[in-house]
Image (cartoon, rainbow, N blue to C red):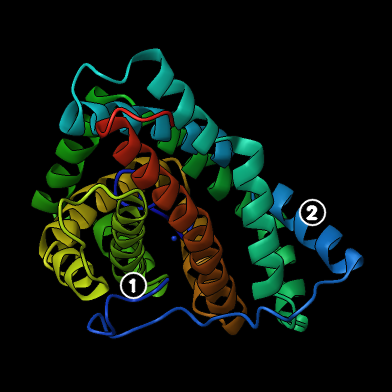
Amino acid sequence: MTLLRSRLSALGLALAVAVAGQAGRVWAQTDPAQTVTADAMTRIQRLSDTMMMGAIMDVMRDEGLDYGRTLEDEMFAGRGGDRWEAIVGLIYDPQTMRARFDAALAKELADAGEDLAAIETFFASPQGQMALKLEVEARRSMLDKTVEEAAKVAWEDMRAKDDPRVASLTRFAAANDLIESNVMGALNSNLAFYRGMADSGAFPEEMTEEQMLQDVWGQEPEIRRETEDWLYPFLALAYQPLPEADLEAYIAFSETPAGKRMNAALFAAFDVVFSQISFDLGRAAARQMQGEDI
């Protein structure tokens, strides 16, 4: 259940408007009129704590600040400075991200019933807690480019030696639909970024929704390649200390109805978070390019 880093779409635990329907899937949309009771919200917040979302949001903030510097270099080099970094920091505010995530997850799991109990049981177990802890630690470690490159080398070495763990991690990725879900999340985030830029009049001529969709969908092959290049080294690094029996238990849970329900809910909730972040970044970047107050 692993989401990709901010520059692609999102984070390190399991990750919509689909691109013009061409991508072949759309996240199930929660009824906007659906309400979540206070008791249900409290339960989801406890689950969110169990899933170590506080630590995850902190890592996402660090990733976001790094991504903000990349945007500055690519779009308005040398013209952002401390003010731009402060704006990016506000956009990636951990408390705001956490509140949006919890609210979206509560709606996604509002009618989860017995599945929710199974989700709570697995992730609160020693096996679940160890896996989550390793994911967060690896995600934080891979903020260091040296660690990221070393993880990629290690993964290629595992493949060359036909290490049995390669098959296990491949099964884990398939059970959680990590490639397709992360690619879709990245495309949706990029579309939201364009929408934010368009909202602030960044384009010399009006850019239609269809043009934005076409441009974003054209990025799909590169995003898919980046997803695969990052995901497997991350999984190998994260779960290296995890006993094979525990990894198998994680895969088995992921293949249950409860595991699939949680995986879909996580990706949908993170999509809410990252779509808003990307829209806000696009709008802020456009105003920075235009020399306006952000």
Tag in front: 1 or 2? 2
Label number found at residue 174:
1
Viewer-side residue, 11 vs 277: 277
- Residue at the far right in the pictured view: 39
Q: Is residue 127 above or below residue 16?
A: above
Viewer-side residue, 180 vs 41: 41
**Quick one: label 1 or label 2, which is nearer the N terminus?**
2
In the rendering, at what x and y percent does residue 204 appear? Answer: 15, 51
| Observer able to see residue 5 | no
Q: Is residue 59 left or right of residue 102?
A: left
Residue at position x 32%, y 45% in the image = 234
Q: Residues within 10 Å of mark 1 (few under 14, many from 20)?
A: some
In the rendering, at what x and y percent does residue 196 appear? Answer: 37, 53
Q: Is residue 55 above or below residue 53?
A: above
Residue at position x 77%, y 83% in the image = 113
| Observer able to see residue 272 | yes
In the rendering, at what x and y percent does residue 65 appear? Answer: 40, 28
Q: Is residue 259 above or below residue 247?
A: below
Amino acid type for the residue under numbered disc 2: Arg
Q: Report if the CB atoms under discs 1 and 2 are less than 8 Å apart.
A: no
Q: Is residue 100 left or right of residue 293?
A: right
Name the residue tied to disc 2. 46
In the rendering, at what x and y percent does residue 235 appear? Answer: 35, 49
Circle 1 SS class: helix
Residue at position x 44%, y 60% in the image = 15
Q: Quadrant of residue 55?
A: top right
Circle 2 SS class: helix
Residue at position x 33%, y 63% in the image = 168
Amino acid type for the residue under numbered disc 1: Ala
Q: Is residue 2 above or below residue 258?
A: above
Q: Residues within 10 Å of mark 2 (few under 14, many from 20)?
A: some
